[in-house]
Amino acid sequence: MNKSIMKASINKASIMHRSGLKCAAETAAVTVILLVGVVGCSRHAGESVAPPPRTVQVVPVEEAPLDTTLRTVGLLTPKDEERLSFKVNGFIESIPVEEGESVKAGQVLAVLKRTEIDSSLDQAREAAAKAQRDLDRGKALLADEVATQEQVQDLTTALRVARAAESSAAFNSAHARIVASADGVVLRKLAEANEVVQAGQTVVVLGGAHRGWVVRVGLADRDVVQVHVGDSARIEFDAWPGKLFTGQVANIASAADPGTGTFTVELRLEAGGARFVQGLVAKVALSPQHTESGKVIPLQALLEANDTEAGVFVLDPGTHTVHRVNIQIGRISGGRIEVRNGLKTGDQVVTEGAAFLENGGTVRVAAR
């Protein structure tokens, strides 16, 4: 090979080598750029981006009068309600009246069969007559000095006992029937003819309207202590929709009903032209004379609640963060609820937006 050909070959190889080095360098540069981009993207993806603050509305805890109204239901009944019964045991012969029937004073309402009662009265009369004869005989013997003074005294005592038994039997015989003591209405019949009744067992309930009408309600112990004679009441009946009756507390039971454990409160009211009938259900709103005040917040501030406890979010004005607080709650009063414990007057509680907050979260307070 001549020298010119060899020189050309060497130059070509040198050019190719330089080109390869340049391509490798360029490839490495691109690789570094890509790696830097990947690392940069990874770093940004790992960083936490704080969510924007939630917009909320807050209101302060306030001192305000509390609604102490007691709401309950009761039954309308005549003021004069008599639960009539027989003085003695026996079979009922007849009850010649029906529920809802008007009766006059002195009218017979129920009668017992008199066979047994009259027999007891006859026995008592015969015993008294015998005791009288024994005493007369004893006095005659005493006059003849056959009997002693002590024996005559014993016979005198026996006569008195016999006459007392006769008087008792006569009294029971006279009360073997039930008679209306005044004009009224038969409210209930609790027995029928041919039934056996015990002494004192209620047979007929008689109501008289000449002393007006009352509504009787049963209150729990924690409520009855707030009520006093003279307190006013608003009363409604489904029979007269939209009509409001006014009432007043006339009587408060001093002992609880053994069956229900409640205390009976009697409310006097005026018919106001309405035709009252016994047994109407009354919706009663009692307003105690005394008023109370306490801390209150809107109902919508509550997160969840049971009978006495609830949760709320309270704003920290310095850090614009909210914290969940458990509170003790009481009575509801006009869209607000009493706070018995857990907050102080002036605390800012969240009302709008509370459902989307987290404890310790940052918020933005919207203008009201």
Image (cartoon, rainbow, N blue to C red):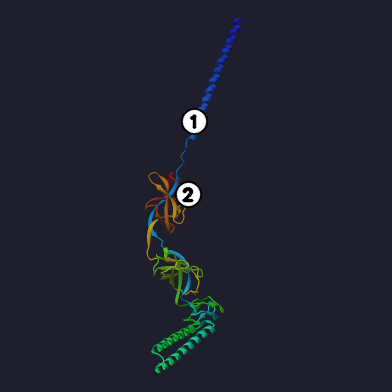
| Residue 24's disc number | none
**Vertical placement of residue 294 versus 93, above or below:** above
**Vertical placement of residue 227 versus 2, above or below:** below
As rendered, which of 366 and 138 lies closer to the eye? 138
| Residue 40's disc number | 1
The reply to whether discs 2 and 1 touch (Cβ–Cβ < 8 Å) is no
As rendered, which of 269 and 11 lies closer to the eye? 269
Mark 1 closeness class: few <14, some 14–19, many ≥20 residues within 10 Å = few
Percent coordinates x, y for residue 22 in the rendering: 54, 18
Percent coordinates x, y for residue 157 in the rendering: 41, 86
> Alpha-carbon distance for marks 2 and 1?
38 Å
As rendered, which of 98 and 149 lies closer to the eye? 149
| Residue 355's disc number | 2
As rendered, which of 111 and 285 lies closer to the eye? 111
Number of callouts: 2
Mark 2 closeness class: few <14, some 14–19, many ≥20 residues within 10 Å = some
Amino acid type, mark 2: Ala
Percent coordinates x, y for residue 108 in the rendering: 51, 83
Label 1: which secondary element: helix
The residue lying at 53 percent from left, 22 percent from top is: 28
